[in-house]
Amino acid sequence: MRVLIAGGGIGGLSAALCLLHHGHDVEIFEQAPELGEVGAGIQIPPNAMKVFAALGIADLISENAFRPESIEARMGESGLTLFEIPLAEHAEKVWGASYLHIHRADYVAALRAALKQFPAHKLHLGCSVAAYEQTKDGVTAKLSDGKTISGDVLIGADGIHSTIRAQMLGPDQPRFTGNVAWRAVVPMDRLGTDAPNPTACAWMGRGKHAVTYQLRRGELANFVGVVERDGWTNEGWSEGGSRQEALANFDGWHPTVRRIIEQSDELFKWALFDRAPLERWVDGRVALLGDAAHPMLPFLAQGAAMAVEDAWVLAVALSEAERDPTAALRAYQDQRKPRTSRIQDASKANAKTFHKRTLAGLLGTYGPMWIAGRVAPKLVHQRMNYLYGHDVTRQA
Ligand SMILES: Cc1cc2nc3c(=O)[nH]c(=O)nc-3n(C[C@H](O)[C@H](O)[C@H](O)COP(=O)(O)OP(=O)(O)OC[C@H]3O[C@@H](n4cnc5c(N)ncnc54)[C@H](O)[C@@H]3O)c2cc1C
């Protein structure tokens, strides 16, 4: 099978690796002149790491990552710990793979390094896919410089603004979720005793929350601070923000959160958009993958992980039904849609859980969490099984 991929983000590169691993030829078209990512961290949960283990590249991905000891939920102002879910060895034992934090640039670099091991791929940078055409025998990607390239299948891994999605389902806008995310990465040695714990820590607050964790073997600290806001009028998806504004957003919060903001060289404000689950992701020989198919709020840290899972399922489906790629793509969609739709919904629901405003809401939500964390910690851990325990590499 000759597979064309629009988009060289985490989804497109993972798809390329899974397809190459299963013996297909791959051609990737990335609009940016270089492969890269925003200067921020990302969490790789065990469900995604199992795909990398099956590809034989788990060590490569882990090399520059950080392995947190636990997931912590704490109150943003007091720092009170609501509950803790052990990770490290526990993640490997219970969910079958590590839970990692990684700088996005290191993530993409590791995927790129893995790709170089496969001669059956071509990567075109600075090359944008503008449209597609298909017949019953093949599909043609039309590039924005006027060239055309033909293959058996085209995968739209071109992100939330996906051109392929717009052609497949008609133009529409993703919806602003009412949340903006502050993002910063700061060297750990600037943070002294206020440096974040070696955990994935979610800090809860009224109409906002923050996440802190370590990256790059513990050399860097990552900060995400999500604040509710009425609208997003800026045309871009991110804008620089002032330290004063971020500090005002997190006024009175725990020193760990405030110190990271104070010590950051650069702070970005990122508008968070999503879409309701799409009706379909497939049009004949064309399929969507990753954020192009199911963009979600990052409140379960699963958006990229879903793209990685998609990649494996897609590659297996195409291998099993080589003579009928359209049936294979439909099988891929049918297998993936229930899970990604569930996780889109659960990510959205977490905004409500993280951002309680009233005293009744705070007590009614965080009180039971605090009690469960002490009385029935196993139950709290088991609630994560559907996310982290899932193993697409073991499914038929
Ligand atoms: C604040 C925040 C925190 C997050 N944290 C996590 C986390 O901890 N864990 C997690 O799993 N997920 C997380 N996510 C989600 C994750 O970042 C995304 O789900 C993931 O990056 C999607 O990857 P993708 O490859 O599908 O899309 P993208 O990363 O958007 O990549 C699309 C690529 O396609 C290219 N492209 C676009 N159009 C074209 C075209 N027409 N032709 C050619 N190329 C094109 C783009 O340049 C880009 O390189 C977070 C998101 C945010 C906003």
Image (cartoon, rainbow, N blue to C red):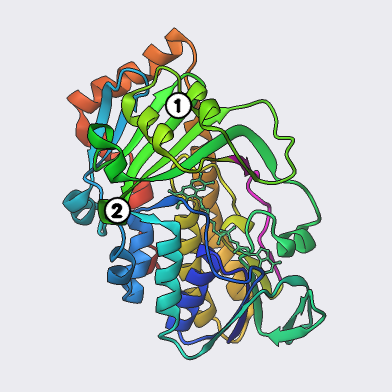
For label 1, the residue is 353
Residue 336's x, y, as percent? 52, 59
Image side of residue 364 versus residue 146, left or right: left
State which quarter of the image contains the C terminus.
bottom left
For label 2, the residue is 99
Image side of residue 339 versus residue 212, left or right: right
Question: Quadrant holding ligand 1?
Answer: bottom right
Q: Are marks 2 and 1 in contact (CB under 8 Å)?
A: no
Q: CA distance from mark 2 to mark 1?
A: 23 Å
State which quarter of the image contains the N terminus.
bottom right
> In percent of the image, x 42 and y 51: which residue is there?
42
Residue 282 lies within the magenta run: yes
Q: Which residue type carries mark 2?
A: Tyr
Residue 11's x, y, as percent? 53, 64
SS at badge 1: helix
Position of 43 relative to 378 (above/below):
below
SS at badge 2: loop
- Determine which quarter of the picture holds residue 186: top left
Q: Nearer the viewer, residue 235 or 205?
A: 235
For the question of whether residue 144 can be seen, the reply is yes
- Using a 10 Å C-alpha cutoff, classify the residue at mark 1 as few (fewer than 14 neighbours), some (14 to 19) or many (20 or more): some
Residue 97 lies within the magenta run: no
> In percent of the image, x 45 and y 61: which residue is there?
105
Q: Which residues are magenta?
A: 270-283
Position of 368 relative to 32 (above/below):
above
Q: Which residue type carries mark 1?
A: Thr
